Image (cartoon, helix red, strand yellow):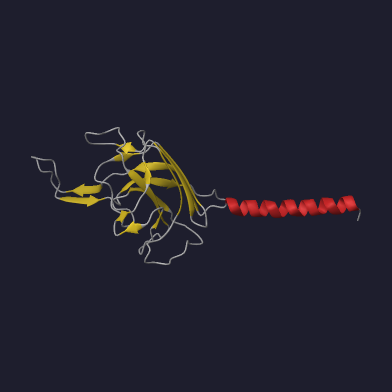
Amino acid sequence: MTRVSAVAVMLLATTAVVGVVNADSRASLARFDGGIGATPISSFSGIANPLDGTFEKVTRNFVRNVRPATQLWTISDLKADVRPDGQITVEGRGMILAGGDSIGRAPQIDVVATLICEAQAPFVERNTADQFTSSFESGVPLDANGDFRIDATLRTPSNSNIPMPAECDSPVLLIRSISGAWLAAGIPKFAAAQ
């Protein structure tokens, strides 16, 4: 083998290894493309009270044991990528109130992201901020247009040593206020079937 062909083989082998490493580094545990705003009520039944319009039975819209906001929310766009090591990037656009006197506006609040991979209880909340009971220590600010960006590492509550899962077959991504209520959810983007 000539010196030139040996160098060419080494370059090809190095390129192949780099390609595999780069492909692995781009791997995602979960991806989300699009968002859904929070609706506080998932169902109601019974006879409506003619005086105030309330119903006898109301079911709040809990998502995997996480309580909803008490007001309607909407979100124009959401994209998120979660890496196997827990690194998460979330880009949210136009997350604003969809009801009440401040409809169409974004309140001055901080938000966090929560990833839940379990389809059934017990659910593990992996958050972008430390959680104390039902609230969080900090978050990222929602700007006046309802836009936000989260670049963080997901972590579990401090009283658990649960690692990131190897797979996330039933991913739920919630955007929450630091008070703990969910305001929006990501739409999972699953790999296309081969």
Give residue 129's position: percent from left, percent from top. Answer: 39, 54
Q: Nearer the viewer, residue 158 or 10?
A: 158
Asked if 114 appears above or below 96 in the picture, the reply is below
Q: Nearer the viewer, residue 48 or 183?
A: 183
Q: Please give the name of the residue rendered at 84% of the width and 52% of the height, measured from the top-left corner.
A: 7
Q: Please give the name of the residue rendered at 38% of the width and 35% of the height, measured from the top-left corner.
A: 94
Name of the residue lying farthest toward the right: 2
Give residue 141's position: percent from left, percent from top. Answer: 37, 42
Q: Please give the name of the residue rendered at 40% of the width and 61% of the height, measured from the top-left corner.
A: 156
Name of the residue lying farthest toward the left: 51
Q: Nearer the viewer, residue 56 or 157?
A: 157
The quadrant of the picture occupied by the N terminus is bottom right
The answer to whether 12 appears left or right of 178 in the picture is right
Give residue 185's position: percent from left, percent from top. Answer: 38, 46
Give residue 87's position: percent from left, percent from top. Answer: 49, 53
Residue 131 shows in the view = yes
The answer to whether 8 appears left or right of 14 in the picture is right
Asked if 157 appears above or below 88 in the picture, the reply is below
Residue 174 shows in the view = no
Which of the 4 image quarters holds residue 125? bottom left
Q: Please give the name of the residue rendered at 53% of the width and 49% of the height, measured from the top-left corner.
A: 191
Q: How many marks?
A: 0
